[in-house]
Amino acid sequence: MKIQDLRPAIGAKKRRKIVGRGPGSGHGKTSTRGHKGQMSRSGAGRSPGFEGGQMPLIRKIPKRGFRKRPVAGRSIVNLDVFSKLKKEASVTPELLKEKGIIKGPVNFLKILGRGEIKIPVHVKAHAFSKSAEEKIKSAGGKCEIIK
């Protein structure tokens, strides 16, 4: 047996149905769509939730709560992240972006107080939580608000 003798198994390859080529083809006139009705029209198709005209399940189930869309450019960083930085003199939004802690644009940075800080650090941010400000100052650091 040679490679040119190889053929697909009988019935494995099926010819595509060709429609709309006249009455002699057997698939002319209505092109296998039948007469009238939703699926016979051009642009016919049903949305994923369509249930044949019955009230769709997604509309029957009660909706609760909402999800707040995050504002682009707003970042929140906790104090425990500063332990990963190697004794930086000052921490700025640009430095955090450079180190990969903040992803995307940085228009607003808020520092929160989760975690501990032991080294004195000069932190520049747009906002600080009270606990974060207290912890930074107790470690001997400074909090500078960027306008």
Image (tube, rainbow, N blue to C red):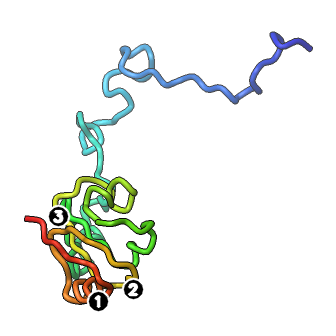
Residue tagged 1: 138
| First in sequence: mark 3 vs mark 1 | 3
For badge 3, the amino acid type reads Phe
Residue tagged 3: 108
Name the one closer to the observer, 135 or 25: 135
Q: Residues within 10 Å of mark 3 (few under 14, many from 20)?
A: some
Name the disc covering residue 24, or none.
none
- Comparing labels 1 and 2, the label whose residue is closer to the camera: 1
Query: Element under label 1?
Result: helix
Residue under the point 45% across and 70% down: 84
Residue under the point 20% across and 83% down: 129
Q: CA distance from mark 1 to mark 2?
A: 11 Å
Q: Residues within 10 Å of mark 2 (few under 14, many from 20)?
A: some
**Residue 118 sits in which quadrant?**
bottom left
- Comparing labels 3 and 1, the label whose residue is closer to the camera: 1
Name the disc covering residue 116, or none.
2
- The answer to whether 67 is drawn above or below residue 21 in the figure is below
**Residue 25 sits in which quadrant?**
top left
Q: CA distance from mark 2 to mark 3?
A: 23 Å
- The answer to whether 123 is drawn above or below residue 48 in the figure is below
Query: Element under label 2?
Result: loop
Q: CA distance from mark 3 to mark 1?
A: 25 Å
**The C terminus: image quadrant:** bottom left
